[in-house]
């Protein structure tokens, strides 16, 4: 996506605010002798920002607006070390609600809907984000927060909830509980808005089959407002994101060079109007791509593809960036293949080689399956792997997370 004149203007305002506040990013710019940008090339010269920068700013080093304008903080989970604290002004809270309400609208949700919110409230951005957006839209909120499935199901019936907001795993848990109790006919759900986890087609289909509802993926991260910066529309061709609030690039996570639309890489986000804690070229480490062309819905907002994982999972093979979830997606198209697979990458005679081990049962012609899988990988990803078909049960299983990628190049 080319940066527009309007976006350049807004980035320059964000830069001024960051420099004036003497924030970590303002200092980075001063060191680099940058005071503003005029075009795409200037923008692409701006330094990146990283989660570690944000952590180093703990507790309130990111605060870019004057204290009296800050109305709230949120925090990302601190699984490794210090959490990140993001200050919000009243305008940031309002902008976020506007974006989130837009998400609901793209999912076809209206002020006549009743929205049951199951993500948590508190320091993190989930529950309150869903709530502010719903109130901005004018819908009726049933603010449950997480857990207490008994009460969730009771309220869902009594309030005649039409929209469920949750993580994918909690949506599945609720769906299975509804099925188990045989209360499908008492449930009025029409739609689910699902955030904050990567989830596969199999899980989506299971929830849809049990509940008969439409499911929408919502995107966001605490560092950049929270959930609500993008969502898929009913055509389900990727997530529209709000480029009046954000400029999004996809970069090669190894060379850090921006990639053309359509290519897979890391999502990098620049906020355009944030006051409390603006971010320039923030590396999300989420993998996706910008989908070229127009969505059948006619929306002018650009689209990101489904998040395919994290940059840490990425493999570079024969100069092509590959990640396990791409292989997983391809294997799902072969019902005769089990859910287990293993990828081994080696470097032989000056060339990278990927061996892909898959399992099937004795009723399948191994050689034919091998050729079909190899051809599908070639057409989707761009190189031909050596596919090895083995009997079901031969690949290693683990109670913990199974190691599926073994890179022998650096042993
Ligand atoms: Zn659309």
Image (spheres, rainbow, N blue to C red):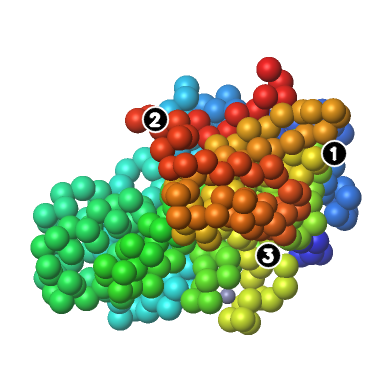
Q: What is the x, y in percent for residue 152?
A: 17, 58
In depth, the one of 135 and 377 nearer the eye is: 377
Secondary structure category for the residue under label 1: loop
Residue drawn at x 71%, y 21% as measured from the top left? 410
Q: Is mark 2 within 8 Å of ligand 1?
A: no
Q: Which residue is mark 3?
A: 291
Question: From what the image shows, is residue 286 above or below residue 376?
Answer: above
Secondary structure category for the residue under label 3: strand
Secondary structure category for the residue under label 2: loop
Q: Is mark 1 within 8 Å of ligand 1?
A: no
Q: What is the x, y in percent for residue 222?
A: 49, 45
* Residue 34 falls left or right of residue 307: right
Q: Earlier in the sequence, mark 1 or mark 3?
A: 1
Q: What is the x, y in percent for residue 348?
A: 79, 28
Q: CA distance from mark 1 to mark 3?
A: 31 Å
* Residue 295 falls left or right of residue 86: right
Q: Quadrant of the N terminus?
A: bottom right
Q: Which residue is mark 1?
A: 34
Report the image quarter containing ligand 1: bottom right
Residue drawn at x 68%, y 17% as measured from the top left? 411
Residue drawn at x 57%, y 40% as measured from the top left? 357
Q: What is the x, y in percent for residue 323?
A: 63, 43
């Amino acid at each position: 996506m080319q940066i527009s004149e309007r976006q350049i203007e807004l980035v320059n305002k964000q830069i001024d605010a960051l420099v004036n506040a003497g924030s970590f990013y303002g200092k980075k710019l001063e060191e680099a002798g940058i005071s503003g940008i005029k075009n795409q090339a200037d923008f692409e010269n701006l330094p990146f920002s990283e989660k570690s920068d944000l952590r180093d700013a703990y507790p309130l080093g990111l605060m870019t607006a004057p204290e009296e304008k800050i109305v709230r903080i949120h925090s990302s989970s601190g699984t490794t070390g210090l959490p990140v604290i993001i200050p919000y002004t009243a305008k940031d809270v309002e902008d976020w609600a506007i974006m989130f309400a837009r998400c609901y609208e793209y999912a076809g949700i209206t002020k006549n809907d009743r929205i049951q919110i199951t993500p948590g409230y508190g320091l993190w951005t989930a529950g309150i984000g869903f709530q502010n957006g719903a109130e901005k839209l004018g819908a009726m909120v049933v603010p449950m927060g997480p857990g207490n499935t008994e009460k969730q199901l009771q309220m869902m019936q009594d309030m005649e909830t039409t929209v469920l907001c949750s993580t994918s795993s909690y949506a599945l848990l609720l769906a299975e509980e509804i099925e188990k109790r045989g209360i499908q006919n008492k449930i009025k759900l029409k739609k689910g808005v699902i955030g904050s986890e990567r989830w596969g087609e199999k899980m989506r289909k299971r929830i849809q089959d049990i509940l008969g509802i439409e499911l929408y993926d919502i995107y966001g991260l605490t560092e950049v407002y929270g959930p609500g910066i993008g969502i898929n529309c009913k055509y389900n061709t990727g997530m529209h994101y709000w480029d009046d609030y954000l400029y999004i690039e996809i970069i090669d996570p190894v060379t850090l060079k921006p990639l053309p639309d359509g290519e897979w890489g890391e999502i990098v986000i620049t906020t355009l109007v944030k006051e409390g804690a603006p971010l320039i070229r923030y590396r999300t480490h989420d993998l996706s791509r910008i989908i070229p062309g127009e969505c059948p819905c006619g929306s002018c907002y650009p689209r990101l593809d489904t998040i395919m994982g994290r940059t840490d999972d990425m493999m570079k093979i024969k100069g092509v960036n590959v990640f396990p979830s791409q292989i997983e997606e391809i294997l799902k198209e072969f019902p005769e293949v089990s859910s287990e697979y293993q990828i081994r990458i080696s470097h032989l005679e000056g060339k990278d080689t990927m061996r892909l081990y898959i399992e099937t049962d004795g009723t399948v012609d191994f050689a034919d399956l091998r050729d079909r899988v190899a051809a599908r990988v070639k057409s989707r990803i761009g190189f031909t792997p050596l596919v090895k078909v083995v009997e079901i049960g031969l690949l290693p299983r683990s109670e913990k997370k199974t190691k599926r990628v073994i890179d022998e190049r650096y042993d």
